[in-house]
Amino acid sequence: MSAQEVTDPPTPMVDADAATVRAVYRTFEQDTAPVRALRGADLAIRRGEFVAVMGPSGCGKSTLLNLIAGLDVPDEGEVVVAGQSLAGMDENALALMRREHIGIVFQFFNLLEGMTVLENVVMPAVIAGRKRRVAESRARALLDLLGIGDKARQAPATLSGGQRQRLAIARALANEPTLLLADEPTANLDPEGARTVRDFLLELRRERRTILLSTHLLDEADRICDRVGVLHTRLLAAGPPSELRAGRPGHVTRVQLAELTDAVVTAARAVAAGPVEVTSGATSSATGGPAGGTVAVPVGDPGRDNPALVAAIVAAGGRIRFVTEATTSLEEAYLTLLGGAGSTEPRVTQLEGTQLEGTQLEGTQLEGTKPGGPQ
Ligand code: ADP
């Protein structure tokens, strides 16, 4: 090796995104009016990244995944998979692209019911030209990895919902796709089935597989993804869950006080990074004691600001009962993005071109929506 070769920095590997969606529009003609499912969606999925697109039912998640899979064509904009634009590809070229680069796990299971579990995973690889022996040993390894290796000789119909979905994932991984597309893979599963599928997706993330997951479950996106895109016909925001949280209402420190005085509130406001919410406790005037209360103080950096907040309140004569720190949940960040922070309007109102039915977010109510009512 020459001195030149030793001192030169290694040439960076040109590593194209696994998939890129640029300014994509898709409108569907429906009986009553056209539905604009996507209006200028942009998203890049880097190799080795686990991205979730998150949004309520009807926000365009499946449409986006279908476009990336080449199962549908955008009205405007461009979809690029593994460096190749899908524009102008005919059905054969698209089928080839899918075979080479895309693994699909869609809500309907897409399993071949007449074949065994093992054959379901072997078949896509054989069709793609792999040697049967190689395809079979890889299929067995995948089934083992997914915890259904002992079901290899059974029919898919004999599996539970969670096991069927894991089989669908194994099948989608049979050809080692550049990108795994998983459309709400836990949506129709019982909690136990959903948990095993989620655990497996986390396993895939550890292996640095490239995955695009769609979900309406905030908690799911929060726990298992590197990056989350909030979709509402276009990407309203995309970033690591922690970043989405931090960029929104931020951290709030609640200080419960034995006595709520003007001086204490003024002291809290001086440290606050935003409007301070003041809540009076049950008045103790009946007993002649002072009324306690709570100040909820937005802070930029709790580690830095909380000691200053406590010091300011104590200096103003405040008697602190306790201090709690509330971190913004992804749910709050999400609702803020959809509805506008601090709005007195319902936080999630009519989503244009979408329906909110069935959009119960895990552990939350959609404020301002009428459950079951017309949207
Ligand atoms: P999500 O996956 O977020 O639930 P979709 O992408 O399935 O949302 O749908 C977005 C909107 O587009 C919905 O209003 C849906 O009814 C409409 N839509 C999707 N596919 C079609 C289609 N093939 N024909 C007509 N309308 C469609």
Image (tube, rainbow, N blue to C red):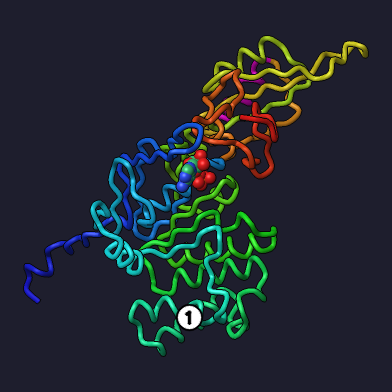
- Residue 248 can be seen in this image: no
Q: Quadrant of the N terminus?
A: bottom left
Task: Identify whether 235 is placed above or below 189.
Answer: above
- Residue 32 placement (x, y as % from top left): 51, 32
Look at the image and say whether residue 33 sits in the magenta stretch.
Answer: no
Vertical relation: 295 (above or below) 372: above
Residue 266, picture quadrant: top right
* Left or right of residue 124, residue 374 in this image: right
Compared with residue 161, is residue 259 higher up or lower down, i.e. above or below? Answer: above
Q: Decide if residue 351 is on the left or right side of residue 123.
A: right
Residue extending farthest bottom: 133
Position of residue 234 in the picture relative to residue 254 (left or right): left
Q: Which residue extends farthest right?
A: 287
Q: Residue 112, position in %: x, y?
A: 53, 74
Q: Left of 324 or right of it: where is 50?
A: left
Who's the residue at 50% across and 51% down the image? Answer: 214
- Residue 13 visible in rendering: yes
Magenta span of residues? 305-316
Which residue is rendered at x = 55% and y = 66% of the image? 200
Q: Residue at x 65, y 24 (%)?
A: 296
* Quarter of the figure with the C terminus: top right
- How packed mark 1 is, by other alpha carbons closer than 10 Å (few <14, some 14-19, many 20 or more), is many
Q: Secondary structure at mark 1?
A: helix
Q: Amino acid at mark 1?
A: Ala
Q: Residue at x 61, y 23 (%)?
A: 346
Which residue does the numbered mark 1 point to in the structure image? 139
Is 308 in the magenta? yes
Q: Position of residue 175 (x, y in %)?
A: 39, 73
